[in-house]
Amino acid sequence: MTELTSLTIAEAREKLSSKEITSVELTKAYVDAIDAFNGTFNAYITTTPEKAMDMAKASDERRASGKVGALEGIPLGIKDLFATEGIHTQACSHILDGFKPKYESTVTQNLWDDGAVMLGKLNMDEFAMGSSNETSFYGPVINPWKAEGSNQQLVPGGSSGGSAAAVAAHLCAGATATDTGGSIRQPAAFTGTVGIKPTYGRCSRWGTVAFASSLDQAGPIARDVRDAAIMLKSMASVDKKDTTSVDLPIPDYEAALGQSVKGMKIGIPKEYRVDNMPEEIEALWQQGIAFLKDAGAEIVDISLPHTKYALPAYYIVAPAEASSNLARYDGVRYGLRVDGKDIADMYEKTRAAGFGTEVKRRIMIGTYVLSAGYYDAYYLQAQKVRTLIKRDFETVFHAGVDAILTPATPSSAFGIADENLAADPVAMYLNDIFTVTVNMAGLPGIAVPAGLDKKGLPLGLQLIGKPFEEETLFRTAHVIEQAAGKFTPAKWW
Amino acid sequence: MSVDLATVKRVARLARIAVTEEDANRMVGELNGIIDFVEQLSEVDVTGVEPMTSVTPMDMRKRQDAVTDGDKAEDVVANAPVTDRNFFLVPKVVE
């Protein structure tokens, strides 16, 4: 018999539907797997086994009475950025110590309304600021993948590192994640999983701890393209509580799978061929091009001239928004308080003790670029460059390009506590060089595994689409998945 | 533009983050590294370009200015470190 935890969401859905298994059995298998192996990966920072079993039981009862939601009985992991009522919600920061919200985020509520079961809260970089999951107050997450013949522990990427590792190690059927500059797509690429950042506005941001409000979007990390399509359909919604959520019908994303890409125009942006790009990444890209060409797509060379300015513009806009959003953590309304001699001293000591190094660094940058005399030179300039970045995309889409194919990351997963990256914040930021443009323009982007490097580690390709054309991405990513196959880490745990 | 120690301390004060002398000295190097990196934006010609205010052109949805929620004082203060009768307590601000 196959292990229940090895089933994809679609496979589990079928077995639940045919009464071959129950949600209680499926959920128990995950609870046991988490018990046995979470210590190895540090993917969950809090688990809710009793709640999970209660939800599973309720799901089986609903099913017996004929009420079956789109995710009925499916056990999921939730990134610690999503508010979950009465349950640990800290964005993996010390400053939110003990925070248990009195409300539920819209995205997670949508999942529970569709019958899903919660297994626990997943590790992440503090306030989603990081590309390796090493800035978490709860310690790093270990990637289930290891290089062939090596015992070195690798990062799962970030910020949604717990989500990606839990999905790859089969500690949940699928996971919620969020993406501000690449935080869904980069960890998906590092773990051989599929992650989609939908168009800005597709998922409500209500109840998601804010990092950079004009860039943040929720999305799923899943085992394959179909599971990602199933999850996104449930996560997406228009929401009165988030005025930037969009009132557009949510398509049946799964129905896009298996549709042909014949005649589709796929753009290959020359600016993504960056200096010092490893040969393997270039080879993977060429392989992806070949997959799509074989499937009948037309490949066209395109230019997105402002690409190189996306990352520097991001490192003005995102910290500026973060410095404003994180001003609320002052030791008064929630979380940590460190007493001081007066109120300002209390604020300063609380924030010094509560925020980690990377978060402080970004608050400082944000405060600096917004401060008197610098606003025009930095923030306003970055917002103008952002207009140009978006215009680049509009121009190619207007010329008939349906989707854009790029590498997802400039390398495969790197080692935990990499000294060069620790010493140079900008080197770590370069991880997001291919993903960040998508957030700056508010577009949808999907990362799909497409091969392994020489070390046997997964590499991903990224597809970028027009606003609210996630279906095109699912359809095209599915073609790549069909051609490349799926990738699972050899079990060493 | 480069960031010196006095600027780091001033920004830390604005951001309400206490920094030790050692933190501040380390941040000088780190912040300059990041500022140098973002400096390349100044080479982009943005003549006549509007700053982006929203990635999707949309009209802000509005609603009637009416009470739709409330009577949750206990919920509001439930996570606060120090409270008294549904008030947040802070160190004395007015003598």
Image (cartoon, coloured by chain):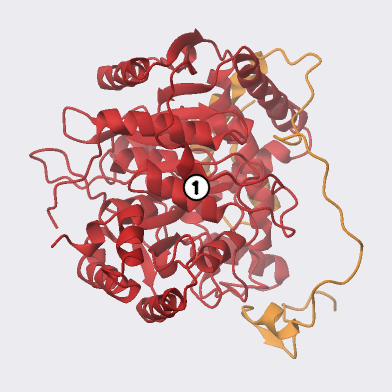
Chain colours: A red, B orange
**Looking at this view, is A324 or A492 the one in front?**
A492
Q: Position of residue A303 (x, y in %)?
A: 54, 11
* Left/right of residue A128 with respect to residue A13 in the rendered view: right
Q: Residue at x 57, y 26 (%)?
A: A310
* Left/right of residue A143 with respect to residue A100 in the rendered view: left
Q: Residue at x 72, y 39 (%)?
A: A370
What is the quadrant of the C terminus of chain B in the image?
bottom right
Q: Position of residue A490 (x, y in %)?
A: 14, 47
**Looking at this view, is A287 or A113 the one in front?**
A113
What chain letter is assigned to the residue under label 1?
A
Q: Residue at x 50, y 49 (%)?
A: A232
* Left/right of residue A16 with respect to residue A126 in the rendered view: left
Q: Position of residue B48 (x, y in %)?
A: 81, 15
Asked if residue A134 is positioned above or below residue A103 in the image, the reply reads above
Quarter of image, res A121: bottom left
Quarter of image, res B78: bottom right
Asked if residue A381 is positioned above or below residue A60 in the image, the reply reads above
Callout 1: SS: loop
The answer to whether any part of residue A276 appears in the image is yes
> Which residue position holds label 1?
A129
Q: Residue at x 79, y 39 (%)?
A: B58
**Looking at this view, is B10 or A375 the one in front?**
A375
Asked if residue A188 is positioned above or below residue A114 in the image, the reply reads above
How many labels were placed on the picture?
A: 1
Asked if residue A442 is positioned above or below residue B16 in the image, the reply reads above
What is the quadrant of the N terminus of chain B in the image?
top right
Q: Position of residue A402 (x, y in %)?
A: 54, 21
**Looking at this view, is A98 or B21 the one in front?**
A98
Q: Residues within 10 Å of mark 1 (few under 14, many from 20)?
A: many
Residue found at the very far bottom of the displayed protein: B85
- Look at label 1 and name its amino acid: Met
The answer to whether any part of residue A427 appears in the image is no
